Image: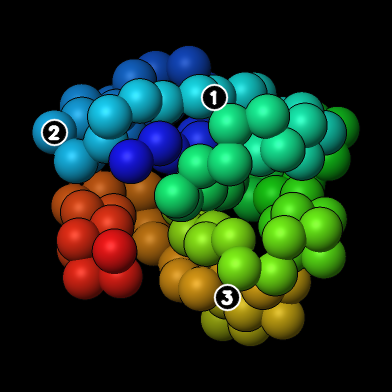
């Protein structure tokens, strides 16, 4: 399975890869939502792990773009924000789930149970 990680913090991208490395065959990654659509189109990953707050294009906008182009895409928001409004906004954008960076092991559950 290929996983696209959209996260502006390089250390967090590496940590996520360590947490789920045995579940993925390959990773592609970018630092900003503006690159996510092109990477999705090129690699067609099984999952997108999407941060919310990024410099140029935020994760909610990038999620909407991916879901508009590929309605069957699976986007899991991975963020430090636990605000209920953001959780609902992520759902409206098309994300299938929302995971706190404080509990990255939840990503494993999503990737395994929703495979």
Q: Earlier in the sequence, mark 2 or mark 3?
A: 2
Q: Is residue 102 visible?
A: no
Q: Nearer the viewer, residue 71 or 109?
A: 71
From what the image shows, is residue 102 above or below residue 31?
Answer: below
Check disc 2 and report its element: helix, strand or loop: loop
Instruction: Say whether marks 1 and 2 touch (CB < 8 Å).
Output: no
Q: Does residue 37 appear in the picture of this structure?
A: yes
Residue 21, percent across and down?
Answer: 20, 30
Please identify the quarter of the rendering in which residue 66 is found: bottom right
Say the numbered circle drawn on residue 87: 3
Q: Which residue is mark 2?
A: 22
Depth check, mark 1 against mark 3: the one in front is 1
**Residues at badges 1 and 3 in contact (C-beta under 8 Å)?**
no
Please tell me which residue is depicted at 50% across the width and 35% down the height of the picture: 5
Tell me where residue 49 appears, x and y as whole percent. 48, 47
| Disc marking residue 29 | 1
Q: Residue furthest left?
A: 22
Earlier along the polypeptide chain: callout 1 or callout 2?
2
Q: Residue at x 72, y 60 (%)?
A: 70
Upstream in the sequence, badge 1 or badge 3? 1
Q: Residue at x 46, y 50 (%)?
A: 47
Position of 50 with respect to 101 (left or right) is right
């Amino acid at each position: 399975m290929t996983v696209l990680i959209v996260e502006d913090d390089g250390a967090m991208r590496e940590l996520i890869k360590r947490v789920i490395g045995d579940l993925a065959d390959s990773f592609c990654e970018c630092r900003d939502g503006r690159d996510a659509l092109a990477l999705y189109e090129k690699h067609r990953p099984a999952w997108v792990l999407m941060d919310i707050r990024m410099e140029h294009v935020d994760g909610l906008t990038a999620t909407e773009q991916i879901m508009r182009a590929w309605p069957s895409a699976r986007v899991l928001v991975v963020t430090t924000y636990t605000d209920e409004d953001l959780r609902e906004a992520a759902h409206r954008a098309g994300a299938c789930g929302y995971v706190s960076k404080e509990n990255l092991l939840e990503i494993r559950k999503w990737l395994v149970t929703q495979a």
